[in-house]
Image (spheres, rainbow, N blue to C red):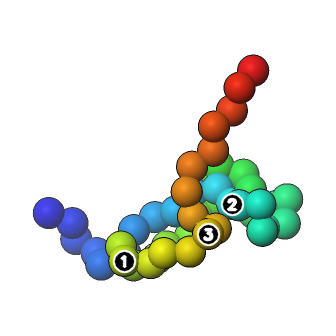
Amino acid sequence: MFAGTNRVNRGGSWNNNVSNCAVANRNNNTPDNRNNNLGFRVVCL
């Protein structure tokens, strides 16, 4: 199904500096990685 063992995380979190919060910022983690810096944002305009 997937070629690699890691998954891509995009953007940053409340715990990152401003330069890491762009959507273009990418990082990777194993699928079982859990911490309070990963998740999604809800934006209301």
Q: Secondary structure at mark 2?
A: loop
Q: Judge by depth and name the residue closer to the eye, 24 or 31.
A: 31
Q: State the count of labels.
A: 3
Residue visible at 44% across and 78% down in the picture: 33
Taking the view exactly as shown, the residue that stands out farthest to the left is: 1
Q: Secondary structure at mark 3?
A: loop
Residue 17 lies, in percent from the top left, at 84, 66
State which tag comes first along the sequence, 2 or 1: 2
* Alpha carbons under labels 3 and 1: distance apart: 13 Å
Q: Is residue 12 left or right of residue 33?
A: right
Q: Are marks 3 and 2 in contact (CB under 8 Å)?
A: no
Q: Judge by depth and name the residue closer to the eye, 5 or 14.
A: 14
Identify the mark at residue 32; answer none if there is no mark: 1
Examine the rendered structure and indicate whether residue 2 appears above or below residue 10.
below
Taking the view exactly as shown, the residue that stands out farthest to the top is: 45
Identify the mark at residue 36; answer none if there is no mark: 3
* Alpha carbons under labels 3 and 2: distance apart: 12 Å
Residue visible at 74% across and 56% down in the picture: 21
* Alpha carbons under labels 2 and 1: distance apart: 18 Å
Quadrant position of residue 14 = bottom right
Examine the rendered structure and indicate whether residue 28 appears above or below residue 42.
below
Identify the mark at residue 12; answer none if there is no mark: 2
Residue 15 lies, in percent from the top left, at 78, 68
